[in-house]
Amino acid sequence: MSAPARGCGTMATALLHQLTLCVLGPRLYRIYREPSSSPLPLPAPQATNPPRSAPAAPTTTASWEAFYQPRSLEKYTDSVLAWVSVLWSISYYTSPLAVFYLYRKGYLSVPRLILFSQYTATFLLLLAGVTCLRGLGRWTNPQYVQFISLLEETTRNNSAENKKKLSRYNFDFRSWPADFRWDETSSSKGKQGATSVAGVSLLKPEPRPRGAADGILHRMQKLPCQIISYLLAHSFGRRMVYPGSVYLLQKVVMPMLLQGQARLVEEYNGMRAKLVACDGNEIDTMFVDRRGGHTEQGKKLVICCEGNAGFYEIGCVATPLEAGYSILGWNHPGFAGSTGVPNPQNEANAMDVVIQYALHRLGFQIEDIVIYAWSIGGFTGTWAAMSYPEISAVVLDASFDDLVPLALKVMPESWRGLVTRTVRQYLNLNNAQQLCRYQGPVLLIRRTKDEIITTTVPEDVLSNRGNNLLLRLLQYRYPKVMTEEAVGVVWEWLGTASSVEEASVYSQYEVDDDWCLSVLQSYKAEHSGNFPYSVGEDMTPEGKRQLALFLARKYLKNFDTTHCTPLPPSEFQMPWSL
């Protein structure tokens, strides 16, 4: 074969390979502008509520609108495939009802099933044709061709230079090369958290005493209930607890997620990364480094744990970020770019690899890490505090002590036993139990109009499960102080709905802050041990009441708003400690 013929053959092969990459490649959402040389300046201390509508630079607002512009062929075929994806999701959730309906109508006979399979095969062929047309549209777009070539090069050679170039693109995260694995460091193998591929260690519910009722016959009688519990937890139960994992909801909020990512990357030089947990789930993270500002806040890394429908792109990371801290946000398994399904084991596995990434790749010391958890994120936040006790501090915002009371609130009373068994076995978010294993500073933020973690109505602050979390923590740390009478006084203080009523109860019992602080400091100077403290053994009932109120006020701060209102940066503060 002549040289020109060989050259033509090589070129044709290369073009065919490129076309194949375009057909099978990920969806490209946008191309970021070049990041600024330094992140945005920190807000002035007196500006507690800076206007978010004013852009920091003239190019910022315009850049948010500079999404990747696909050609017409790619745009229309993408729309077709997106609608098919939505319809598939709807049919997946309604499939049990559809199968039941078809069975009752007699449509599940063999001839009809054969006809249905033929229709399905034809539909799949049409989808394959639409996918090929989309690939052809991408192939004619120089921006996409440049992107897919860079992605292929980065997959072969995952160098820092290639990753830096690739970070300018926002695309389907499933195709993003992994940046960090849970087993990359030797310390992760010996740490209490990550010990094996099976997963990190969790606290288990206390076992019931074994007796005659635990015989084989009794276990056989419980088998139907166990099967129902399993189906309940893995069908709508998990999706009720973690609605953010529902595909349809993610499709609705996708434009906001893309805009949130653009803000973090373009304004704050955010660095996105994919972490692989010990269960194989891929965790989507975003890191903003403020250490270059040479401020005390910037030296601290705040790891943010989002709520059950929260994403780091639009979630609680904004609060510590605007307060000047370095932040590391991550999405729950099954949320946005993270894979897997959210359950206690997968959540803890994800949290473990996030902390390992912060320590061994980002270069933070464990003493410089603060956990900030909102709502259901309190589970992973308290797990991190329990498993990494050297963590600097824990801030729990609008969180609760245990999931069981909140689950019983939304389920029929006749299901009480089944719901309790299901939650304990499959969705055991035991925040209070885990938090009591942590020895460091803790701050609880209670929303006084919280409509989510109250068991009655939002106005009933006494039914807020944050109260129970506070009392569980105080009773564990200061058992001699938290007598029945002292607990009653704290409940009276927790029942106040305003700062005026709160101060009234505080003054009613003539709490002397200086005396309480001196008592605790004296005890700590003489007993340098861990919690629980034995302070209060020889104290009068009046002294215990004062000390109990003093401690409650130090550990819990009220925020007069609803559950989902963003916490202002001025309200974000480090916990009290002796």
Image (spheres, grey):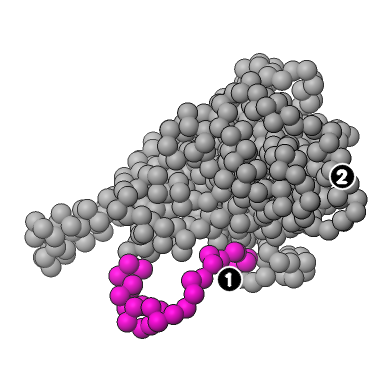
**Outermost residue, front side:** 540
Q: Quadrant of the C terminus?
A: top right
In the rendered image, residue 290, in percent from the top left (x then y), is placed at: 80, 36
Q: Is residue 329 above or below residue 218?
A: above
Q: Which residues are magenta?
A: 198-226
**Do we see residue 71 in this rendering?**
no
Identify the residue under disc 2. Answer: 521
The kind of residue on which mark 2 rests is: Gln
Q: Quadrant of the N terminus?
A: bottom right
* Mark 1 Cα-neighbour bin, 10 Å: few <14, some 14–19, many ≥20: few
In-front residue for pair 404/109: 404
In-front residue for pair 102/499: 499
Residue 219 is inside the magenta segment: yes
In-front residue for pair 388/85: 388
**Outermost residue, left side:** 106
Say left or right for 336 vs 367: left
Question: Which of the 4 image quadrants contains residue 226?
Answer: bottom left
Which element type, helix, strand or loop, lies under badge 1? loop
Q: Is residue 285 above or below residue 559?
A: below
In the rendered image, residue 402, in percent from the top left (x then y), is placed at: 53, 51
